[in-house]
Image (cartoon, rainbow, N blue to C red):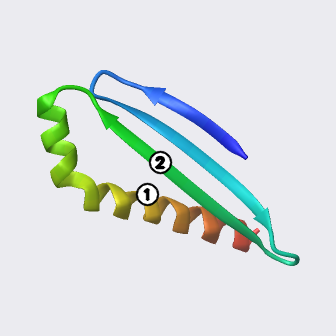
């Protein structure tokens, strides 16, 4: 398990990543909690949720591809 917190001016992001042994494979499970600071950022994050999820999935897909090619 790998966990960390990013604290910026606009938001705090709690990230938890777990690597689960599945025999010949490994499952990566990631969870994130974004906590916007201030009313403006809360509104922006509400409308940007799907884009944030897509970008996170793209990053995980890139990591998977990199690992499997090695």
Q: Name the residue under label 1.
A: 56
Q: Are marks 2 and 1 in contact (CB under 8 Å)?
A: yes
How many numbered badges does the structure rendering display?
A: 2
- Residue 65, position in %: x, y? 62, 71
Compared to 60, does 69 lie above or below? below
Residue in the picture at 86% in, 78% down = 24
What is the quadrant of residue 67 in the picture? bottom right
- Residue 28, position in %: x, y? 66, 63
Q: Which mark is residue 34?
A: none
Looking at the image, residue 20 sits to the left or right of residue 45; the answer is right
- Residue 23, position in %: x, y? 88, 76
Q: Name the residue under label 2.
A: 32
Residue toward you, 58 or 52: 52
Discs 2/1, front = 2
Residue lying farthest to the right in this orientation: 23
Q: Tell me the quadrant of the picture where the C terminus can be found.
A: bottom right
Looking at the image, residue 59 sits to the left or right of residue 34; the answer is right
- Secondary structure of residue under mark 2: strand
């Amino acid at each position: 398990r790998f966990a960390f917190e990013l604290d910026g001016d606009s938001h705090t992001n709690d990230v938890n990543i777990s690597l689960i042994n599945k025999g010949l494979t490994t499952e990566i499970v990631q969870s994130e909690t974004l906590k916007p600071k201030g009313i403006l950022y809360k509104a922006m994050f509400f409308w940007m949720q799907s884009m944030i999820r897509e970008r996170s999935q793209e990053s995980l897909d890139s990591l998977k591809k990199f690992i499997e090619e090695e």
